[in-house]
Structure formats: structure tokens, C-alpha cells
Amino acid sequence: MDSINYNEHRANLFNLQKVSWSVFGSLTWNNALHRADTDKARALRHADFDTLLTRVCKDLGVRRKHIGYYHATEYGKGNQCHLHFLLWDKRGCISSEVLASKIQEVWNTEFVLARHIGEIERGAVVEVYDHTCLRKPAVQYCLKREFDSKGFEREPWERISDNLLRHLIWLAK
């Protein structure tokens, strides 16, 4: 599934708060190559996220095109990059609990144990999106801005699936 670099579509940012999200999560890696602030590391993190989502959809019998996503890199302290993500079930046919649980399970087995790239203790934090919070803290957390040691804003490296972008454009009308 194609995705679009979200930086080109900043105007749709406001509409992320209007999406009926299913899942909010974070993924971390234990090896330095994936945590680095480099183009290669970013490509590896994106590939891992795509592989994870594809596998989860396959296991749940859902077509990948029916799950929309937004994810962003957070640099964190010491430039230890990781991802925060939001998932949207376009058709509303998977319970959020099942989706969150399956992501956690696949990350902790295939990615942690088999590929040695994540950490079981904190490698994936995946939870059902809380719709009761009026301020949408999960969305705001994914969209937060970071600054380097000189006070300059860091490039957020956001990605959004094409199906979610179309939905955001529709919401804006």
C-alpha cells in the first residue's frame, strides 16, 4: 500500500482529530541501526511498520487497504528514534481490542524474538484508542513537535496511508 509523506499535506493535520481511530501505539527498537537519525534507519523503521501491519491484517483476515494509518518518528532523548502511530479501521469490522492485541503479539514474537529488533519490555505499547478524552491526547502526542539542542524544530518524518488521506480530505469538505 502506498503512503504519502505527510509533510506535503500539513493542511489536513487538523482533521486527524475527527477520525474514529481504533488503536494508538508506539514501537521501539533495541538495535542502534533502527534507532539512528538517518535516512537508512528511517527506511528500516517504515519497512518494519509496513511489514507489521501487513502481517496483522493477514492474521486477522482483513484487507490491508481497509486499515488506514498515520505514524510519526519521535527522536526522544539522545536521538533514540521510535514511532508513534494511529490506526483507523475504515470498515469498522475489527474490534479495537483484537487489533491492538494482535499488533502487540506479532511485534513481540516475529519482530522481537525472530528478528531481534524490538524489546519485549517496552518494544511495543499498543492500546485501544480512548474516544472519551475531548482533547484527543493520543493524536496530539503523535503530532507533537520536537526541537534540537539549538532550539530548531526537528523534521517530524510523518507518514499517512493514501486511504486515510482521502478520508481526511473528505472530512474537510
Image (cartoon, helix red, strand yellow):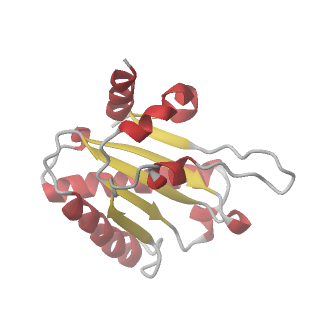
Farthest right residue?
150
| Residue 3 x, y percent position in the rendering | 42, 35
The answer to whether residue 43 is left or right of residue 91 is: right
Image quarter of the C terminus = top left
Image coordinates of residue 6 in percent, x first then y, are: 52, 34
**Residue at 42% of width from left, 80% of height from top?**
120
In this picture, residue 163 sits left or right of residue 121: left
How many numbered circles does the render carry? 0
Extreme-bottom residue of the structure = 121
**Which residue is pictured at 70% across the width and 67% down the height?**
77
Locate residue 63, reporting x and y percent: 18, 43
- Does residue 53 lie above or below 88 as drawn? below
Residue 19 lies, in percent from the top left, at: 34, 39
| Camera-side residue of 159 and 39 | 159
The residue that appears at 28% across and 72% down in the rendered structure is 105
Vertical arrangement, residue 68 with respect to residue 104, above or below: above
Q: Quadrant of the N terminus?
A: top left
Query: To which quarter of the image does residue 60 belong?
Result: bottom left
Which image quadrant for residue 10? Answer: top right
Residue at x 44%, y 50% (from the top left corner): 136
Residue 1 as seen in the image, left or right of residue 148: left
